[in-house]
Image (cartoon, rainbow, N blue to C red):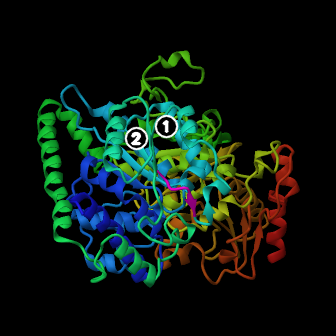
Amino acid sequence: MNLDDLCINTIRMLSVDMVEEANSGHPGMPMGAASMAYVLWMRFLKHNPENPKWHDRDRFVLSAGHGSALLYSLLHLTGYDLSIEEIKRFRQWGSKTPGHIEYGDTPGVECTTGPLGQGFGMAVGMAIAERFLASKFNRMGYEIVNHFIYAIASDGDLMEGISSEAASLAGHFKLGKMICLYDNNHISLSGETRLTFTEDVCKRFESYGWHVQNVDDGNNIEAVSRAIKKAQEETERPSLISARTHIGYGSPHKQDTFEVHGSPLGHDEVTATKKNLGWPLEPKFYIPDEALARFRKAIDKGLRFESEWKEKFNSYRKAYPELASEWDSMMNSELPDAWDKDISVFPPDPKGIATRAASGQAMNAIAKHIPSLIGGSADLNPSTNTELKSKGNFQFPDAPGEKVQGAASGEWGYGGANIAYGVREHAMGAIANGMALHGGLIPFAGTFLIFSDYMRPAIRLAALMKLHVIYVLTHDSIALGEDGPTHQPVEQIASLRAMPNLTVIRPCDANETTEAWKIAIAHRNGPVALILTRQKVPVIDRQKYKSASELTMGAYVIADCSSCMPEIILIATGSEVHIALAAYEKLNAEYVDVRVVNMASCEIFENQPQEYKDTVLPPQIRKRVVIEAGSTHGWHKYVGLDGVVIGVDRFGASAPGEIVLEKFGVTVENVINKARGLL
């Protein structure tokens, strides 16, 4: 057995032993894809096992996250901080080797994958980030940003619709730094792919504008190597390499069957496989010394890669000190001094402004000082107010942007900060995650709140990975009006609040919207969703009511009674705060002691000390009314058995917004009646 084959079989059998020890996992993909993964990692991947976060490393995304044992084997063998003890603890409580790859748990893992197609979309986001940062920072003779984004994708990844959206956009943007190896093994979890997946994948990707190659034998390492080299040389198209592999390669009875996809081989078949591959039956987790020596050369290569880059960057710092300083700030997630100085303060105005419009003003004021802010909407910029003025369009720089209707003002090229996603919410969510994971950028994604459902898998992964992604979700309630129930969100806010690590903020007016943006920019422990109105809402007189800066507490007493303790508490969010304040004024005139609590963010409020929470919502005051033009789910936590929730627990209706609100009882009169009923 030559040394290459020995190394490849080391990957295979380490993966098999991991799955067998755990009695759980997916051995087939690592066995089949080991050869092409070995070629990529040992001949092409620019990385440093001793510094997994080195900025100019190549990124590797195992989109087929069920094949996690493949990546864990590579990480351990090439010298990352992943011990053999952790390899043996595959899929166990507290291990660094969870069943599907999880960002933050394992050194060298670039993103959480497992939900198929998401990793592919995140790889596209990383490729966008690479081109954007290269355009911003690279100068002649100083290519400080110059790396590839590699992905291994399965048939399942390419079946999921998100990969079609993301691949279409990657081809349009001509992301030549993205190279995807397609593990074309003809088998999915429940059977052969010819049951469900007979399209010509290569022609599909060609139609997207990709550079496509076929490798007839994925175990032919020289053929794989030639294909990757050609893909690297193709600078104006992303590349797909379709490699014909054999799931469960080496297993005498289970190779090329779905039985090896998601189940351990079993003791007898492991024995038969080891014999078939000329592998020692014992010990388990055997790693030949000569194979390990070959793999560990990655450490010296990685140190050399990073050292050469640092030398180049030190020269760059001398030649371009201001750019180098900006690079340091962006890559270290540092905010410039006075980054929020140009954000407007809105004067009281009973006619008001839609919070989506106030959001657009705030984000543009912020973008003047934070060059890392980048993003766009799913073909909804005029409605979501998410265009960054004068910041240009992220596009392949081959045509002047002014010739294209709808193009943002400013630069047309890879330095543009506005990403025109088209109608692709699924891909937009994953791409935003990829940009955040890449480092150096604060991505935002805008759409109607109702279509957050299309982004939900990506939002969930952003929350799971605690990424700094900002969602601008507008048209936030049944007050949307005539577009009707297909476009009127009902359950969306409640469902987003149910997601761990996601901070949901529903500001009540323009000034709270600017405060919400400040929170979203500074937040570092997960994504933030800004829930914004389509309709105008009054700008509250903050001389009369509490300051909008109180939003930092999540919930606060915006209006209170003159006595030390209220008889009743009205709790509201967003546009319904104005209804609560109007009811407050009328009840006050009837000498009812009323408090209004603006619950703009339940998540932020719940993170406050109990003492503060009790001052806002005194436990002894049990007569409470919640007003929110959406699902009542979750609100009973705050009103208990003695309170009332005014909300919407059915789908909306097509009519002018004010009529819809009236018919659903989201009115001042109904709030007063419910309050009187409690009193």
For label 1, the crowd category at 10 Å Cα-Cα, with few meaning under 14, some 14 to 19 and many 20 or more, is: many
Callouts 2 and 1 close, C-beta under 8 Å? yes
Judged left or right of residue 604, residue 288 is: left
Q: Position of residue 423 (x, y in %)?
A: 63, 39
The amino acid at mark 2 is: Met
Judged left or right of residue 521, residue 536 is: right
Badge number at residue 170: 1
**Residue closest to the eye, 656 or 208:** 208
**Residue closest to the eye, 470 or 618:** 470
Badge number at residue 178: 2
Determine whether the residue tagged by mark 1 lies in a helix, strand or loop: helix
**Quarter of the image where one finds residue 164:** top right
**Quarter of the image where one finds residue 309:** top left
Residue at figure coordinates x 39%, y 80% from the top left: 271
Magenta stretch holds residue 575: no
The amino acid at mark 1 is: Ala
As displayed, is residue 483 above or below residue 192?
Answer: above
Q: Is residue 102 visible?
A: no
Determine whether the residue tagged by mark 2 lies in a helix, strand or loop: strand
Q: Is residue 123 visible?
A: yes
Give the position of the C terminus as an image quadrant: bottom right
Q: Which residues fall within the magenta stretch?
A: 183-188
Magenta stretch holds residue 184: yes
Give the position of the N terminus as an image quadrant: bottom left
